[in-house]
């Protein structure tokens, strides 16, 4: 199963349409999409607008591949559950987001083995095809950096409300 | 004596808006073990992620939604009054900014961890909240500055 997710804050029609057309072309019936506020109505893939965090996590867990916007919620959840993910960044000039931070995120995480980046909808079909041939990583993500955890913990231990 | 009854247990208010902000806050959970932590999210849907802890939801407002911000602020005043946290911590975004500003008014010490999504520059909320955070952190070494934010590692 391929799980597609674009988050809940704004529409991302380019991605939903590209995956829908890809699924139609290949005759795929095992694609499920969380499309948020997107206007495009998928013709070939099943879709829901929103889902609760536990449902979301369960879908990531049962998928072989995640296709998503380059949001950290999608990326971290896929990495935590050891799933390969293809991300496509939202673009500011197309009204898909309020800043191009997803392009920077995509560029940075592109080095990681489980992450494939499609910079636009024309790249997406080939990237999905290729990601499907990659061996399933299934290696969970280690926790946050120990230094960060101990910094926060020590700060809390030495803090008391002043009143 | 159970931990819950200990009067000296530090109280933490951990606040994040949805999606990546929330997921990053949960990755800080090992830092909260043994403290009395209350989570604040932007929908009741997040409650089940932290079912062992107290949870409140606030209006999911962005900085372009003044009415939403006002609603979130009123609710966060109430939550701060109720919880009386020693520490308020947030990974963003706008509701986290409000939580830090209001937490300070209630005497809490404050931690801001800027989202790892902000690779090229700090988030807008992060830039604004920095001077009001007692511990101001970025997750990217190249965004560290002498006057803050500081880099002490990342959630990934």
Image (cartoon, coloured by chain):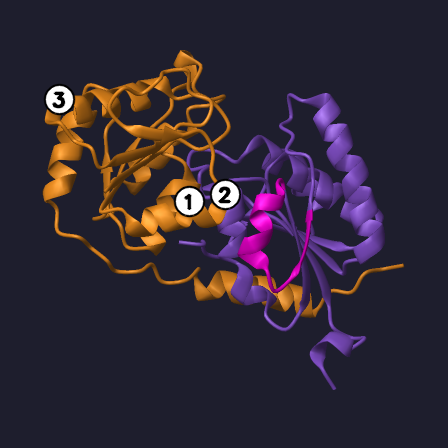
In the image, which lettered chain appears purple? B
Q: Which residues are magenta?
A: B42-56
Q: Residue at x 82, y 43 (%)?
A: B77
On whether residue B53 falls in the magenta region, the answer is yes
Which quadrant of the figure has residue B41?
Answer: top right
Q: Colour of chain A?
A: orange
- Label 1, residues with CA under 10 Å away: few <14, some 14-19, many ≥20: some
Disc 2 element: loop
Structural crowding at the residue carrying mark 3, measured as other residues with C-alpha within 10 Å and reported as few (<14), some (14–19) or many (≥20)? few
The residue singled out by tag 3 in the image is: A25
Q: Nearer the viewer, residue B42 or A49?
A: A49
Residues at circles 2 and 1 in contact by the CB criterion of under 8 Å = yes
**Secondary structure category for the residue under label 1:** helix
Marks 1 and 3: same chain?
A: yes
- Residue at mark 1: A56
Q: Are marks 1 and 3 in contact (CB under 8 Å)?
A: no
Which one is earlier in the sequence, the residue at label 1 or at label 3? Answer: 3
- The residue singled out by tag 2 in the image is A52
Q: Disc 3 and disc 2: Cα gap in Å? A: 30 Å
Task: Please provide percent x and percent y for residue A32.
Answer: 30, 35
* Other residues around mark 2 within 10 Å, as few (<14) / some (14–19) / many (≥20): some
Q: Residue at x 58, y 58 (%)?
A: B50
> Does dot 3 land on a helix, a strand or a loop?
helix
- Where residue A146 sits: x, y (%)? 45, 66
């Amino acid at each position: 199963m391929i799980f597609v997710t674009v988050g809940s804050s704004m529409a991302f029609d380019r991605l939903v349409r590209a995956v829908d057309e890809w699924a139609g072309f290949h005759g795929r019936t095992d694609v499920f999409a969380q499309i948020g506020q997107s206007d495009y109505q998928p013709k070939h893939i099943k879709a829901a607008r929103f889902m609760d965090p536990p449902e979301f996590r369960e879908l990531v867990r049962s998928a072989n591949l995640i296709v998503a916007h380059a949001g950290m919620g999608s990326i971290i959840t896929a990495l935590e559950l050891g799933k390969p993910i293809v991300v496509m960044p939202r673009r500011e000039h197309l009204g898909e987001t309020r800043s191009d931070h997803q392009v920077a995120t995509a560029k940075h995480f592109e080095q990681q083995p489980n992450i494939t980046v499609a910079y636009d909808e024309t790249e997406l079909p080939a990237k999905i095809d290729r990601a499907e041939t990659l061996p399933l990583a299934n290696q969970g993500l280690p926790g946050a950096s120990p230094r960060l955890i101990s910094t926060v913990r020590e700060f809390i231990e030495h803090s008391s409300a002043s009143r | 004596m159970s931990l819950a009854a200990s009067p000296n247990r530090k109280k933490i208010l951990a606040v994040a808006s949805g999606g990546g902000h929330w997921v990053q806050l949960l990755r800080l959970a090992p830092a909260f073990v043994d403290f009395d932590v209350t989570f604040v999210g932007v929908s009741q849907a997040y409650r089940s992620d932290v079912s062992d802890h107290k949870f409140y939801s606030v209006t999911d407002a962005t900085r372009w939604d003044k009415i939403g911000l006002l609603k979130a602020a009123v609710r966060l005043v109430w939550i701060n009054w109720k919880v009386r946290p020693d520490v308020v911590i947030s990974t963003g975004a706008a509701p986290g900014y409000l939580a830090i500003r209001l937490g300070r008014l209630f005497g809490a010490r404050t931690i801001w961890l800027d989202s790892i999504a902000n690779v090229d520059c700090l988030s807008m909320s992060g830039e604004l909240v920095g001077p009001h955070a007692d511990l101001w952190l970025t997750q990217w070494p190249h965004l560290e500055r002498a006057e803050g934010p500081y880099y002490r590692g990342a959630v990934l």
